[in-house]
Amino acid sequence: MGFAELLAPVPEPVTPLGRLRILSPTCGLRVNAFAFGGMSLGEAWADILPPLNQEKSFALLDAWYEAGGVHIDTSNHYQNEESETIIGKWLAARGIRDHLVIGTKFTSTSGRSTSDHGKNEAANLSGNHRKSIHVSLRESLKKLQTDYVDILYVHFWDYTTSIPELMDILDSLVKQGKVLHLGASNLPAWVVAGCNAYATTANKTPFVVYQGKWNVLDRAIEQDIIPMARHYNMAIQPWAALAQGRLQTRAQREKLEASGTFRKGPKGELTGLELEMSNVLEEVANKHQVNSLAPILLAWLYAKYTYCFPVIGLHDTEASQLEQNIAGIGIHLDEEDVAKIDAVNPTNFGYPNNFNGEDPHETGRSTAVPSGQLGTIDWVVDRQVYSSHMR
């Protein structure tokens, strides 16, 4: 590449997926608006997921990469370790490891260890203690065929490991260069706050991203996790962002019902909330001229939190599923759209949230019970918008 070409403007990406975003104010990694969910790669969990052999998995990863994808999320135990193994083989075959952001997780016992030796016998290979982390990362690096991971996540809280033990070993892995950044998944807000407070005072590496369940049907994360993440300048990575297939357009529901493959609720039918939410989402989708609810579900999350990067599991080797998700990147929901969706499943978190009210740095107004004692304040609203939504 000549010097003039080196200084030439960056070409426009093939798709909006290739327009990268900074993960968070505390982490400069360049990532996509949504990550590739590696849980779908493999055949071991065919009882809950469509099986994807190596050939089909490679085809999905290739299509995603060609569309501009750079961020992959997986775990040490997904598909009994097939997920990490497939990703590692794909990275080696394509020779693009350093181009990508790879995140994996520990805490769970690997599927092979459990099946080979038994759950009780493999007890020391699970949890958040030093030995579990050491073995898990060692094996993940082998399967992924790399010498480092970009983000290492605590998968869940085990209530057996102290915060200092956890953060000390994680910090040592960062200092060794085996891990670049730390993430928390499914942890209570008080645990993440305690970990980051300890990391700050002890000069250790803090968590920069939180991965947890969040969608229009399940908004519990908004009670404590979202305010905590905002306070610590952490990114949010929602899983189940598309409500695990429970929300469909009327045409999609009719097609699935006719084929006999429609996913039923506990009582053999969709709940009233799911039907009402589907109808409202379809109204918003029609307004934005998209024929799927997936783009609206993603756009709703982007409207809720700036540094938001959902983890999306792809199962369809055809382009349609990926294209529907990519369409959500360019949709900007206005306040009316968001309010209409929120009204179907409003948050009601009770005390002390209903006493202190919403964060006025988000809403521009104070709704706290004693707000009359604060005087008349013009609040600085912190909500930020990506430049692609300002055009």
Image: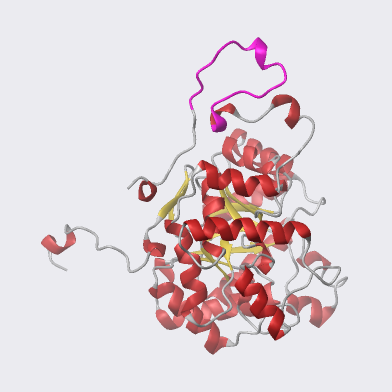
Magenta segment: 362-380
Question: How many numbered badges does the structure rendering display?
Answer: 0
Residue 220 visible here: yes
- Residue in view at x 49 percent, y 72 percent: 322
- Residue in view at x 42 percent, y 57 percent: 330
Q: Is residue 212 above or below residue 265?
A: above
Front one among 233 and 120: 233
* Quadrant in which residue 31 is drawn: bottom left
Q: Is residue 385 magenta?
A: no
Front one among 163 and 294: 294
Front one among 359 and 255: 255
* Quadrant in which residue 293 is drawn: bottom right
Give the percent coordinates (x, y) of residue 310: 56, 58
- Name the side, left or right, on which 253 lies relative to 69: right
Q: Is residue 377 magenta?
A: yes
Q: Is residue 141 above or below residue 4?
A: below
Front one among 367 and 178: 367
Q: Is residue 337 above or below residue 106?
A: above
Give the percent coordinates (x, y) of residue 226: 63, 42
- Residue in view at x 67 percent, y 57 percent: 277
